[in-house]
Amino acid sequence: MTSQAADVLFRPFRLKSLDLKNRIVMAPMTRSMAPNGIPGAANVAYYRRRAEGGVGLILSEGTVIDRPASRNEPGIPFFHGDEALAGWQAVIDSVHAAGGKMAPQIWHVGSVNSPLTEWEPASGIESPSGLVAPGMRRGAAMSEEAIADTVAAFAKAAADAKRLGFDTVEIHGGHGYLIDQFFWSATNGRVDRYGGATIRERSRFAAEVVAAIRAAVGPDYPIILRVSQWKLQDFAVRLAETPDAMTDWLAPLVDAGVDIIHCSQRRFWEPEFPQIDGEDGLSFAGWAKKLTGAATISVGSVGLSGDFMGAFGGESSSPAGIEKLVTRMEQGEFDLIAVGRALISDPHWARKVKDGEPLNGFEAAKLAELA
Ligand SMILES: Cc1cc2nc3c(=O)[nH]c(=O)nc-3n(C[C@H](O)[C@H](O)[C@H](O)COP(=O)(O)O)c2cc1C
């Protein structure tokens, strides 16, 4: 593909105080290489390289809020405490110096345990109903006080992101972690105002998180929310089987203050509701934009032949063309596109697309280092 054909990816994007030079977003990717939860020089250099490589917006790896068991691996960075925030300050200063823009992805893992380590937090594993998957107990059901403290911890993290100079903030609301455990009926059996038979009722916790963040960051600071139908616990499960259900899920979150919905799917071209608009129909990000009017980010196997679940089993992936992506962007289906593994393998992926240079695939061995 010539550089000209990919022009659509290099149009600027503006929303509130956010001003991006192109549409390419680095997907949030946990690397578990922040010793004692503190980002250090290696983490600074890792993000700076992606800014130098021309990425429009970098989303950090998931970085956790101030709750006792908000992380499930010891190398996951904190987004609280003076030392960790000083580390993040160095990250954002370095990214800005290289001409990049960045958001932290703020996260609480809920009751999900890591598939990679036996490590566990000393205490305090929490979830909506003491479940991690259908019928599988893990963590304590959260009290109203724990919920209020968690909402406040998300708001504090977002306020710190803004204070440190990050350009926007992303809330991790997908993949079966805490916020998603409230969305999912199988892990949310609460009978108070955080539970209920409908997805609209189970969206209340997320809406409170978003509203508290909005109050903390003011009206002009963009808020991104990442959501997914799939869960680590069950790739096939869906929160919304119809557009109406998707509206019930996402519209209250946009009303609460979300500006950009980051729609996580494994392959960006897969139709969300093929029964309605066919096998070439709109993706999740396409439907979310159409139904809510919010800006959206799509993601999933950009520039690669295989999807990301294989990466955890050591699978590499060969390069694939980006023609389908360009077509969908030209049709205005979504606003931004996130790129994950291709950017782990090659920090200069965005620049190479712009210059029409050949693209690399994904080498799983690259996951072992912070290069
Ligand atoms: C090593 C690795 C770590 C990931 N960690 C996160 C994470 O912390 N937060 C998140 O929302 N998604 C995470 N993901 C999912 C990615 O953000 C992305 O959605 C997925 O890799 C699909 O994009 P790709 O096909 O371009 O790699 C991770 C993926 C990989 C491969």
Image (cartoon, rainbow, N blue to C red):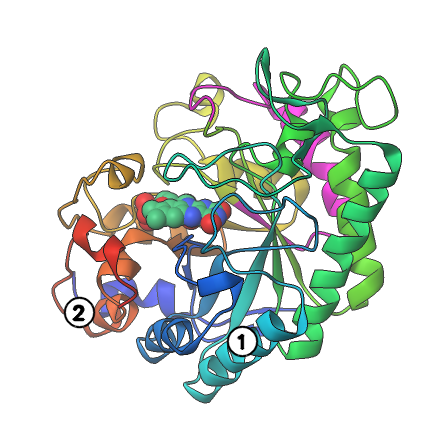
Q: Which residue is mark 2?
A: 356
Q: Residue at x 25, y 66 (%)?
A: 349
Query: In the orientation shown, which residue stands out farthest toward the bottom?
Result: 97
Taking the spot 79% from the left edge, 59% from the top edge, the residue there is: 214
- Nearest to the eye among marks 2 and 1: give it: 1
Q: Nearer the viewer, residue 7 or 154?
A: 154
Does mark 2 have its CB less than 8 Å from ligand 1? no
State how many labels appear.
2
Residue 6, by quadrant, is bottom left
What whole-number distance in Å separates the C-alpha atoms at marks 2 and 1?
Answer: 35 Å
Disc 2 element? loop
The residue at the far front in this view is 122
Q: Is residue 346 visible?
A: yes
Which mark, residue 87? 1
Magenta stretch contains residue 342: no
| Image x and y of residue 44, in percent | 42, 76
2 or 1: tag closer to the N-terminus: 1
Q: In the figure, is residue 188 to the left or right of 228?
A: right
The residue segment tinted magenta is 233-262
**Which quadrant is home to the C terminus?**
bottom left
Q: Secondary structure at mark 1?
A: helix
* Quarter of the picture holding the N terminus: bottom left
Q: What residue lies at 81% left-to-right and 53% top-to-bottom?
A: 152
User: In the image, is 69 to the left or to the right of 1?
Assistant: right
Q: Amino acid at mark 1?
A: Gly
CA neighbours of label 2 inside 10 A, class few (<14), some (14 to 19), many (20+):
some
Residue 333 shows up from this direction? no
Mark 1 crowd level (few <14, some 14–19, many ≥20, 10 Å Cα): many
The correct choice, above or below, for 85 with respect to 236 in the image is below
Please provide percent x and percent y for residue 92: 52, 78
